[in-house]
Image (cartoon, rainbow, N blue to C red):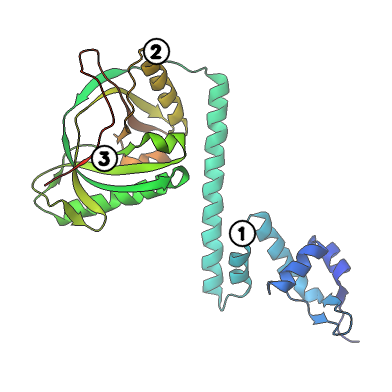
Amino acid sequence: MGTVLLSIGDFARMTYLSVKSLRHYHDIGLLEPADVDPATGYRRYSPDQVPLAQVVRRFRDLGMPLEELSAVVHAPDVASRKAVILQHLERVEEQLRQTQETVTSLRNLLDNPPSRVPVEFRSTPPTAVLAVRAVLDQELVPRWLSQALAEIHEAIVACPQVAAAGSEGALYAPALFETERGEVTAFVPVTGAMQTAVAGRVEALVLPAAEYAVAVHIGPAQDLDQTFAALGTFVAEHAISVEAPLREHYLRGGLDARTESKTYIEVCWPVFRTSDAGGGPVSLTPRV
């Protein structure tokens, strides 16, 4: 008895992969038929290909990009195949974590109406910092910020004449919230002499003196917007807002605390006080 070959229709029914998908997978070299009739172009598949097709479908159900799926199917060895699969599974697990956080946050919004938060006024003097600056799309900020702060701490370790002198933080230009793209400044306060250009992207700056209304977010990072909303409401009620960068300080665990179930993030909203001459846009001064 010769080798059994399946029509593309039968193979589709056996694997839950549509004929359209099977044709596409053939065209891109992901899942090639066992035989193609040169006269008619009809595709035929071997029963031995069913397990591979089932694997392909399950990975597609998990959202694996086709280029990664191709790397799995055509991996030269088991170790290479495993590395690609583990990388994707880690991404899926992170997506599941974010989904669960969003669900928990939504339930919290439904069960607990917005409440006021304690607010204090603070006058911040000019502050010497090591910083990294970039203009970013809003969605890229968390990953970029984590990397930038890590670079700053590496620069501090490499410069024995300086030392960290406060909580790490970030400045966010108003445009980042209004147009989803704007300048972000990651910073760590420091003491000691430092050149204006330090290493790589890291530079020495002086953050200008500013007045802030300050609230501390204590809770899941997913709910940080609630603290922003409560603080923004307070500022609006007192008509004291200034068009200047918002500021955050990461009080517990640094920026990585955003991945914890409970974070301590200080939110600083720029304001002017009635005793002040007024407020306006601020600029960062390179430290000499």
Q: Looking at the figure, which quarter contains the N terminus? A: bottom right
Where residue 98 appears, as percent x and y from the top left, is 52, 42
Q: Which residue is mark 2?
A: 237
Q: Using the image, tell me which numbered label, if any, was put on residue 7.
A: none
For residue 21, above or below residue 257: below
User: Going 43% across and 30% down the picture, which residue do you hit?
Assistant: 224
**Residue lying at 56% horizontally and 63% vertically, measured from the top left:** 85
- Residue that label 3 marks: 168
Q: Residue furthest right?
A: 1
- N-terminal of the pair, mark 1 or mark 2, is 1
Q: Secondary structure at mark 3?
A: loop
Q: At which x and y percent is residue 202? A: 24, 52
How many numbered marks does the figure carry?
3
Q: Dot 1 lies on which element?
A: loop
Q: Position of residue 250 (x, y in %)?
A: 31, 36
Name the residue carrying label 1: 64
The kind of residue tagged 2 is Glu
